[in-house]
Image (tube, coloured by chain):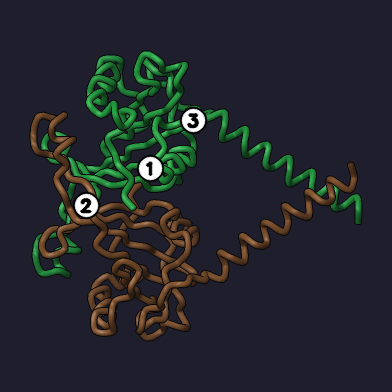
Chain colours: A green, B brown
Amino acid sequence: MKRFAYLLFAVVALAEVVVYVAHASGRSDGEADPVFGITIPPGYRDWKLISVAHEEGNLNDLRALLGNDVAIKAYREGKLPFPDGTMIARLAWSYVPSEENDKVFGRAQSFVPGPATNVQFMVKDSKKYAATGGWGFAQFNDSKPAGEALLKTCFSCHEPVKARDFVFTRYAP
Amino acid sequence: MKRFAYLLFAVVALAEVVVYVAHASGRSDGEADPVFGITIPPGYRDWKLISVAHEEGNLNDLRALLGNDVAIKAYREGKLPFPDGTMIARLAWSYVPSEENDKVFGRAQSFVPGPATNVQFMVKDSKKYAATGGWGFAQFNDSKPAGEALLKTCFSCHEPVKARDFVFTRYAP
């Protein structure tokens, strides 16, 4: 019985280490972005919700902002700047009217996600990304990283929200 | 050392039991809805994202659909009908233009969540809710359950999507 308890304990501990290492390494088989070296963080689709938005104009999308546990904790505690290890994902889909929903409502009013446009990430590492406010930026179109030219525009666009540690999105309760 | 290992093991096991019971009981101090007896599921704000939407008209909101683990698994596997234990949360916030974002873009284009409007839940229990397609419905405005009159309209509105087990929202990849 003692041996069994030890064995069980060892197996649980080992499993936790494996899971931790798999997450912490952020390993992914995908291509890294050419400026900040960021790959698609494994499991990001399971992260918790920060907020949602609709962008009109050229973007014309519906979007969801998800955060890893470090991000969510910082948001909920109102902690700024975001600590190293924060990762924020911005998912976006084209903005499409829902015919089937509108039929039920009896009028055009419902807009839902069409095909995904691209996924963006912000990764906080105050040393590695010191030149860009401590943030690395990445964008993937169908798993393919965006090029250098686009990525070099990220930080300048985020600079106006320096007071919120360069992050536009507020937490939606 | 042996004693310490046992103690640590016992503490971890006990903590897991406490967490499990707290979740499994679905206990909540809030008021139950008057038709289906549903209370606000603890921890629903931490559930994973199903999709997002924008409703115009009287609703005029931005919304996020979150699902518990049973819901997410069923969605990702394309499993219909949803199994008992499925819980879906619909969060909604008023649809508000973002002045600070628009300033950066140089034009009006960004819409973000304003104050929360209400939270709705669908809970699958094929026996308990047999009369309404196996689904219980609830709506809370600032933690206060909606009245009988409103809740009795839920199922008839969802009936047109019977082929998708009465659930409007599709999973956004």
Task: Using the image, name the chain to which the residue with label 1 belongs.
Answer: A
Helix, strand or loop at label 3? It is loop
Circle 2: is it few (<14), some (14-19), or many (20+) Cα within 10 Å?
some
Indicate the position of residue B4 as horizontal and vertical percent values.
85, 46
The residues bearing labels 3 and 1 have C-alpha atoms spaced at a distance of 14 Å
Task: Give the residue displayed 41% in from the left and 46% down from the top.
Answer: A76
Q: Is residue A146 above or below residue B125?
A: above
| Residues at marks 3 and 1 on the same chain | yes
Q: Amino acid at mark 2?
A: Gly
Amino acid type, residue under disc 3 in the picture: Gly
Q: Position of residue A147 (x, y in %)?
A: 30, 18
> For the residues marked 3 and 2, what is the alpha-carbon distance in whole angstroms?
28 Å
Confirm or deny contact between disc 3 and disc 1 (CB under 8 A).
no
Q: Amino acid at mark 1?
A: Leu
Residue under label 2, please give it. Answer: B114
Q: Earlier in the sequence, mark 3 or mark 1?
A: 1
Closer to the observer: label 3 or label 2?
A: 2
Quick one: SS at disc 2? strand
The location of residue A106, given as percent across then percent down, is: 10, 69
Chain ID at mark 3: A
**Left or right, B103 with reference to A173:** left
